[in-house]
Amino acid sequence: MAYENSKNPYVERREWVNGCLKLSKLNLVMNVSIKKRAREREKEGIKPIDALHLACAELGKVDYFITCDDKVIKRYVGGKMSVFNPVEFILKVTEEGNHEHSG
């Protein structure tokens, strides 16, 4: 993610992402397992960079993967994490928060 972000031509966005990266609790280093999993995701019709992001998220055991790419959302199957667009994610966590406070 840091490498990809370093290529972002928009300074403000690059700085925002750098701030988010500083908040992360886990940073994965590229390894054979990540590459192998990414290649499996590519076979499902997912673009290489998106497949790499998904592989890292899966191996990092995240609960949610958030993307604006509808193709990734539709094509991601069989994993333990949930894939949402930002709006769906906010609705999901808001709904879960309401259930926790109402019961």
Image (tube, helix red, strand yellow):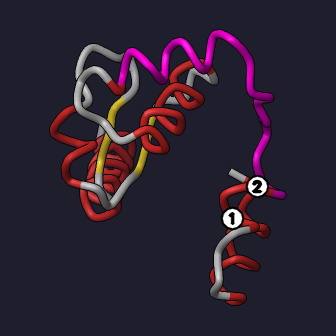
In the rendered view, tell whether residue 4 sits above or below residue 51.
below
Mark 2 vs 1: CB contact within 8 A: yes
At numbered mark 2, what does the secondary structure look like: helix, strand or loop? helix
Q: Position of residue 42 (x, y in %)?
A: 35, 27
The quarter of the displayed image where residue 22 is located: bottom right
Q: Position of residue 84 (x, y in %)?
A: 30, 47
The quarter of the displayed image where residue 83 is located: top left
Residue 31 sits inside the magenta stretch = yes
**Residue for point 41% across, 50% down:** 66
- Residue, far left: 74
Crowd tier of the residue under label 1, counting other residues whose Cα lies within 10 Å: few below 14, some 14–19, many 20 or above: some
- Relative side of 70 to 22, left or right: left
Q: Position of residue 43 (x, y in %)?
A: 29, 20
Crowd tier of the residue under label 2, counting other residues whose Cα lies within 10 Å: few below 14, some 14–19, many 20 or above: few
The segment highlighted magenta reads 22-41
User: For the residue marked with disc 2, what is the amino acid?
Assistant: Ala
Which residue is the site of mark 2? Answer: 2
- Relative side of 56 to 97, left or right: right
